[in-house]
């Protein structure tokens, strides 16, 4: 990922938080000689060494994914920045955003206990605390059948690159103008980007 130095995000805790909060990732690999992408929920292991997820078995991207560098893209919050918000007309619009790229090698999971832990972790992550659903209540035969339809994997992380483009190239006065307009507009991720700008 092209990241100008001023936009490089190196704070490991912030990077982990982005991966956790915006965990519906795009997994990119070369499949039959061309780039292929699948959109999947992934979760980061506690030690930060692996991403866990699974493909649908019918999705053939997994068939030649071993022994190649795989890219997982986590798109964080992003907002359009209008030049009309600046104090001068000599400017152009831009886009503020946060993104994390994770690269590594994929390992297929074979151990059923590890697979089940992975699935339980994903479900528990997204279910609300007061949800009446409990995956442990699912009939074991039904669950065994479902497991046959997926290809669980873990991506052993080799590199992480992260960018936080938050108007750093502009004066504090102009950043304040942008923050004010984002908070007024509050469309999509505007408020999140405004808060990140205030923290930066």
Image (cartoon, rainbow, N blue to C red):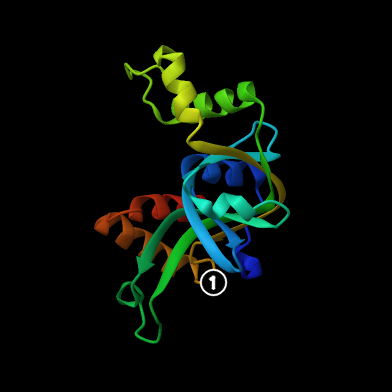
- The residue under the point 59% across, 42% down is 16
13 relative to 105 in the view: left or right: left
Q: Position of residue 78 (x, y in %)?
A: 41, 59
- The residue under the point 70% across, 33% down is 47
Picture layout, residue 71 above or below residue 112: below
Q: Position of residue 9 (x, y in %)?
A: 62, 56
Q: Is residue 24 visible?
A: no
159 relative to 176 in the view: left or right: right
Q: Secondary structure at mark 1?
A: loop
Q: Which residue is mark 1?
A: 169
Total marks placed: 1
Q: Quadrant of residue 13?
A: top right
2 relative to 96 in the view: left or right: right
Q: Is residue 85 visible?
A: yes
**Front position in the image: 126 or 18:** 126
Query: Where's the N terminus, which quadrant?
Result: bottom right
Q: Position of residue 128 (x, y in %)?
A: 36, 25
Picture layout, residue 128 above or below residue 20: above
- The residue under the point 48% across, 53% down is 38
159 relative to 95 in the view: left or right: right
Q: Callout 1: few (<14), some (14-19), or many (20+) C-alpha neighbours within 10 Å?
A: few
Q: Position of residue 136 (x, y in %)?
A: 45, 14
**Front position in the image: 149 or 74:** 149
Query: Where's the C terminus, which quadrant?
Result: bottom right
Picture layout, residue 128 above or below residue 59: above
Picture layout, residue 143 above or below residue 167: above
**Front position in the image: 187 or 30:** 30
């Amino acid at each position: 990922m092209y990241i100008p130095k001023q936009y490089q995000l190196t704070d490991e805790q912030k990077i982990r938080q982005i991966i956790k909060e915006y965990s519906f990732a795009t997994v990119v690999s070369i499949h039959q000689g061309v780039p292929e992408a699948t959109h999947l929920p992934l979760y980061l292991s506690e030690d930060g060494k692996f991403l866990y997820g699974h493909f649908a078995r019918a999705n053939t991207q997994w068939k030649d994914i071993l022994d190649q560098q795989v890219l997982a893209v986590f798109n964080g919050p992003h907002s359009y920045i209008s030049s009309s918000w600046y104090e001068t007309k000599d400017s152009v619009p831009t886009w503020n955003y946060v993104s994390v790229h994770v690269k590594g090698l994929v390992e297929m999971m074979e151990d059923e206990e590890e697979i089940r832990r992975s699935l339980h972790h994903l479900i528990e992550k997204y279910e609300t605390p007061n949800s009446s659903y409990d995956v442990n209540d699912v009939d074991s035969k039904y669950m065994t059948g479902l497991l046959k339809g997926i290809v669980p994997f873990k991506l052993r992380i080799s590199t992480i690159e992260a960018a936080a483009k938050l108007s750093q190239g502009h004066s504090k006065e102009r950043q304040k103008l942008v923050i004010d307009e984002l908070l007024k507009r509050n469309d999509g991720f505007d408020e999140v980007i405004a808060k990140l700008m205030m923290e930066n």
